Structures are given as C-alpha cells and as structure tokens.
Image (tube, rainbow, N blue to C red):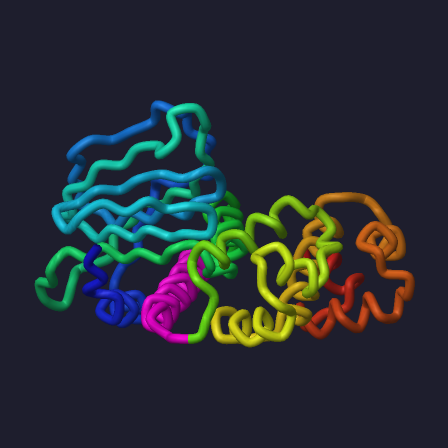
Amino acid sequence: MSRIGIEHWITALADERKRLDFQVYGKTAVAADWSFHDRVLDEHLLYSVYGSQFVCTTTTGAVTLGPGALLWLSPGVAHTVHNADPDRPTTLFHFRFRLGPPARPKPPAVIVTQPGLHTLHPSADLLLEELTLDRPHRSLRVRTLLLGMLIDTARAVRESATRGGLEPRHRLAVLRLIENDPVVRTTPAELAEHVGMSHDYFARRFRVSFHESPRRWLVRQRVRRAASRLIESSLTVSQVADEFDYTDLFQFSRQFKLITGLSPRAYRRGR
C-alpha cells in the first residue's frame, strides 16, 4: 500500500496557519459485519486498531491491520473497510478532520503502520480525551498529539525495512502477550520464550524494533498501566504499587518519575 505524503502532512500539521477543524471522533466497538464500501471523504481519516483486525482496500491494494496498527487516509482516497473476522467485533479509534487550505495539490496518501508501534494507543487515548473535553488550548493540543502520532508513524515506516529486528508476527505476539497481562508481570525471559527465541538473541532483535531493551520496555508498560490506575481509581499510591508487584514504594516512585517525569502523587494531582 502506498505511503506517499507522510513528510508533506507532517509539515502541514506543524504549520499553525493551516486551520484544523474536527467534528467526528470516537473509540467504538464495531460489529462483526461492520463495513464501508467505496467511500470517498473530503476529510482526513485516522484509524487506530485496538481489538481483532480489520481490512482496508484502496486502488493500491488491500491490507489487514491488527492491534497496534494505524491507518491514515488523506482526502480523496476511495476506500473499502470491513471487519476481518466475521465472528468477532473490532474496537477502533476513529478521527476525521480537515486541514487547510493546502499549500499546493498533493496526491492522496495512504499511510499504514502495522502492529508494533506501541506508542500509538496511549497517544490515541490522550487525543480522544482532549477531543472530548473543552479545555484551554484544545485545538493546539489536538494538533500536537496528531503531529506526534504522524511522526511516530513516519519513523516506523522508515524503520520497518531495518534488518535485524523482530518479524511482524513476533512483534504482534509480544504486544498481545502484554495486552493480556493487566499488571505486566511478564519478564524478558518469558517474552523470549513466548516467541521461541533464546534470551540474548531475542533481546538484540527486540532492541532494533523497539529502540530499548526488553526490561526497560516492560518497565515502561508497567508504569503506564500504573499511571492509568492512579487516575481511574481511588487507591493510594502504596496500594497501586502493591497491585503492580512493587515491594518497595521508593523503587515504584523512582521508576514512575523516570518514565513520566513526575512522582506518582504529582501525576495524580496534575490529572
């Protein structure tokens, strides 16, 4: 599937003279028979996949996207989308917006990131939160989050051809294992065993794909889940630390601040 236009749209989003208008957005569980056929929009359309898989077909071909994938269609792209599994619903983040006026005509772009870009879901969640609430500087924050997602996508597309990383099926297996581990008790050795590799070999390939060690990445996932728990529950910081298997509150606070830039209490107060 074509990936033209990424750098153009990064430049366009970074230009605050271009008005950003948005009205249609949400995170939706769609039915197994969900579909749109031969649709053409005059808006940008962004999908991020949370559950199961869905298929998108354009004039350049068809692609199946699973959890962790992102699809960005610029205006004018004729497309058909449907659930890949007739027996399972899919959860999608969707966002339609206008950006203009364009500096010059550009060919329609279809931008795809396959599963493995683990930063997309938190970014999509933050974007949806910002879209839903009427806060100061809302439009600028939305633009910034969109720009970050597109930059992450551009990097992933460019790096997808890098040799020595995990194969897409192995990246997907790792992400699914973590999705099913609510407090991220999984160890680097268990990740390696899950994809059938030795620990050292897996660690080398993992670092190429995720740009950090498996241990550091697991800490990041655990802290991200713990941060959500702090916001969503009335548990004390100590109780959240216990829930995520931290026997040392100081270690929990130190890792939390290392990842988020804030102490657990400061993070909760800021939200």
Find the magenta span and give its range. Answer: 138-163
The image quarter containing residue 254 is: bottom right
Left or right, residue 55 beside residue 221: left
Magenta stretch, main secondary structure class: helix
Picture layout, residue 250 above or below residue 62: below
Left or right, residue 189 beside residue 211: right
Does residue 17 appear in this view?
Answer: yes
For residue 88: magenta? no
Does residue 137 appear in this view?
Answer: no
- Nearest the eye: 139 or 43: 43
The quadrant of the picture occupied by the N terminus is: bottom left
Left or right, residue 15 beside residue 266: left
Picture layout, residue 220 above or below residue 123: below
Q: Position of residue 55 (x, y in %)?
A: 30, 40
Say which residue appears at 47% left-offset and 66% top-offset: 166
Say which residue appears at 44% left-offset and 34% top-offset: 90
